[in-house]
Image (cartoon, helix red, strand yellow):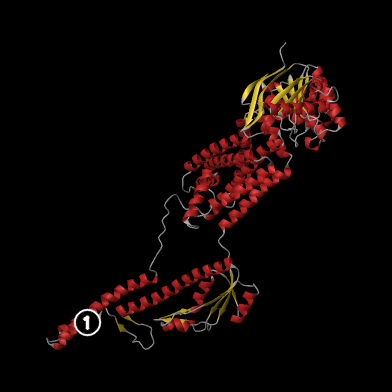
Amino acid sequence: MSHALQVQGLTKRYGQLTALDDVGFQADPGELVALLGPNGAGKTTLLSILAGAQQADAGTVQPDRRLIGWAPQQPALYSKLTVAENLAFFARLEGVPDVEAAVAGMLEQTGLAERAREQVGRLSGGNRQRVNVAIGLIGAPAVLVLDEPTASLDPAQRERLWLFLAGLARAGRTVLFSTHNPSEAQRHATRALVLDRGRLLFDGTPGLLVERSGLGGGDLEQALVAFLAAAGEQDAQSQ
Amino acid sequence: MTWLLRKDLLILARSRLLVALLVLYPVAIALLIGFAISRGPSRPRVAIVDETAPGETVQVGSSRVEVARYARRLFSEVDAVEVASRGQAVHDISSGDVLAAVVIPPDIAAKVSSGTGQGQLELIYNGDALEQSLVQSQLRSALAQANLGFSEQIQRAAAQAIEVLLKGGNLGVLGAPEDLVGLNRIPGLLREVIAHTPAGPQRDALVQVQAFADFAAQNLSLSKRVLATVGQPIEVHSVLLHGRRTPLDAFAVVVAVSVSVMFLAVLLAAGGLALEREENALARLIRGLLSRQRLLAGKGLLAGVCSFLVGLAMLAGVGAFVPLDWGRSPLWLAALAAGAAGFAALGLAIGALAREVRAASLLGILLSLPLALLALVPAGAVGHGFYDVIQVVSFVFPFKAALQALDAAVNDSSPAMGLPVVHLLVLVAAFGALASAGLRREV
């Protein structure tokens, strides 16, 4: 079976700091993959490289970056343009053949049809994030990467977004998202990746991460903390 | 790129206050600078206390030179306010009603007439250092002019007296004979007398007198020319090395248009590019949807075209009041286009470095305004070393080159348009490369 996303040997350095160190993984169609890790682990750098917003120093990403949809952490939208104008602008840049149909379909899919003529600057944070995700999807990519998509949303908005993303996965899209909230990963992700100091430490299901943590059950947040602590100790011993 | 331009125009159309500011601010600044350049310094208000008797004159030979006539010439350089007394003048200075006072003493005519001493004026002034400097410099210049006029008048009177001495006639001086024999006629008269005088000591003495009269006539004639030289020993002959002389009004128009084009292009390009970063859209755009070069070209094109059109409209509008050579309008277009491109490239470099529109705008203003003012500093107005620094700064930024190109296009001034246009194109490439490098920073 061919993978929807294949990452090999990704390395990125900022001067002396290694942000990503030989990171590699695959994701299949229909998977909802959570990217976990502490601040500074390299999550945003990894997603930016997958999206083509940054260049890696080494490594490869398949498919081509233009076939990967991207919703950055801060909504990347023009606040003076309406929702529909934002979608149409990016659809044209993506080379979408029927822009009007794509915009109408995306407005319908994201529940933004009623807000289509509103300027984005007047929308709530939740709706801005929905437009942000919608723009990531406007080119109908096979893979969607989202950087902390629920960071600025209230619980109801978060729930709606997860339903939407789950629907995308069910439709065969591969969704990779970063989050600081392990419980979201436990509830919604089919797979979890743990990144720490630029290295990929874990690739498996959330249940497996709980097992590996040695806590013998409990929630993913506690398991992640224990897992990272154990990894830190191992590092210290090996040095 | 078409969609990028359409999107930016749509955003501009929805930012009416910003657009109004973008157009009005540079036009206002440009008009102020143009107005300041095209007008001379204002005349300081000066009180005049004339203590001389009305109609008092100085006798020079047969002529009488009126003191008040030259006093008026002195005061034509200032906004003169006549006051009755020195005390009143001091009061007016203290109250700030006038900046200075000039007192013409009652004995000035007597002193000048005596030829033993100079006439003296009293200058009383107040105000800050700048005002003091202005009053001193204007009155010194006016006094030099008045002295020159006075001296010319004296020289003319003296030359007239010499003429009468040489040719004979009426000297016009009280007590002088009415029909003087001219010095020029004396050698001839003496020759006739000598011819009829027998040889001897009397004839020898007459020959000596005739030789003296010859010598005196020749040298007195020469002294007329000497007097003319003393009256105005140095005369200015102006030679313009390159091009033709630019009228101050036409130059002010060029400055005003250049400043407007600069502000509009720099602020639009810098703001437009910084907006992409501020809205977090830059990373999304350059991840493969749009190359950095196309993004820069789109932003630069919009800024360049908008500023070009505003510059053209200003030239056309001002042309209704200031005589401009419309036959050169194709050159205007080329110079405006090159200038707008240079300024837009500078704006792109600023926009690529800034993270917010406000920071980019502030940086654009902070950089552009001093650059424009520096480029207008004439050689000799500042120290040699500082002027060299100004020259270098003006060379690496587009304002001076744009000003020269437009001045050459509009006024046929020197240097010719080609060199500044090439200079601008080099700056476009340099600032474009800088902007491209700036966009490569972490997004």
In the picture, the quarter occupied by the N terminus of chain A is top right
Chain letter for the residue marked with disc 1 in the picture: B
Tell me where residue B410 appears, x and y as whole percent: 52, 47
Residue at 62% x, 80% y is B88
Residue at 65% x, 41% y is B354
The residue most toward the top is A1
Q: Mark 1 sits on what residue?
A: B189
Question: SS of the residue at dot 1?
Answer: helix
Q: Nearer the viewer, residue B350 or B156?
A: B350
> Can residue B424 be seen?
yes
User: Which image quadrant is residue B439 in?
Assistant: top right
Tell me where residue B308 appears, x and y as whole percent: 60, 41
Tag count in the figure?
1
In the picture, the quarter occupied by the C terminus of chain A is top right
User: Which image quadrant is residue B341 in?
Assistant: top right
Tell me where residue B86 appears, x and y as whole percent: 59, 81
